[in-house]
Amino acid sequence: MNNNNLNLKDAIYEQFARIGKAISSPKRIELLELLAQGERTVELLAGEAGLSVANTSQHLQVLKSAHLVEAEKVGLFVTYCLADQEVCGFLCSLRALAKKQLAEVEMISKQFLGEREELEQVDRESLLRRIEQGTVIVLDVRPREEYLAGHIPGAISVPLAEMERHLDELPQDREIVAYCRGPYCMLASQAVKLLRARGYRAVSRADSVPEWRLRGLPIDKG
């Protein structure tokens, strides 16, 4: 192999390694997962990730340098978003690979989430038909700004923090399907426990808006 080929491989792999270095921090992966739900300011990201604003900004700069996120300044605030939908696909692939290759992922999931027997097994297209037929109510229990950025068509926004105040508005003669940010988010499971304790038939879905979007299924905004 001549020097040109070696130099080419080294240069290309160095660029690939930039992505690996950018996501080498658990908190940076978490920030990407949050941005997959919708754009956010640094302050909101810091609050959701349990970081200081300064630390969050540093992590975001690393992600930006690898072109995984983009930033826009509006007034006094800087808003971040994923640089491309491919980043969301990469996150889903990373999650799937880790689950397949690392037994610890399943062990930790069971420790914090249990067996998740309440998960809804119906496929996405069937769920959309049930929404149209009015035989099921879908609750988006994420924060309101995430719902506005994109949600399953027909879903109702009831953030978990507000659910107690809205229970009387939910009919008890229909099944309720709750969803949140994905398989490792506990918001939907907590919502299901609350609903079941009040006599509702409720289950949760493991996937979320990013997975729906990647599969080409419709997403509503606003």
Image (cartoon, grey):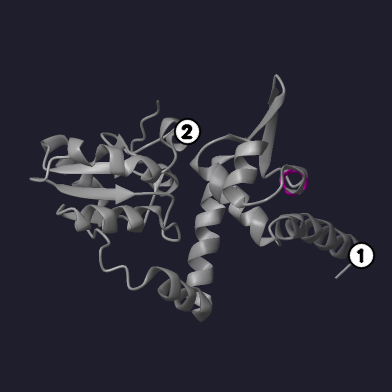
Q: Horizontally, is 68 left or right of 135 in the view?
A: right
Q: Residue at 76%, 55% (x, y): give it.
A: 18
User: Is residue 194 in the magenta section?
Assistant: no
N-terminal-most mark, 1 or 2: 1
Q: Residue at 41%, 35% (x, y): give it.
A: 147
Q: How many marks?
A: 2
Q: Quadrant of residue 202?
A: bottom left
Amino acid identity at mark 2? Glu
Residue 82 in view (yes/no): no
Q: Quadrant of the N terminus?
A: bottom right
Q: Residue furthest front?
A: 165
Instruction: Identify the disc placed on residue 145.
Output: 2
Q: Residue at 44%, 75% (x, y): give it.
A: 111
- Find the distance from the CA under tag 1 to the CA under tag 2: 52 Å
Q: Quadrant of residue 204?
A: bottom left
Q: Horizontally, is 137 left or right of 100 in the view?
A: left
Residue receiving disc 1? 3
Q: Residue at 59%, 35% (x, y): give it.
A: 40
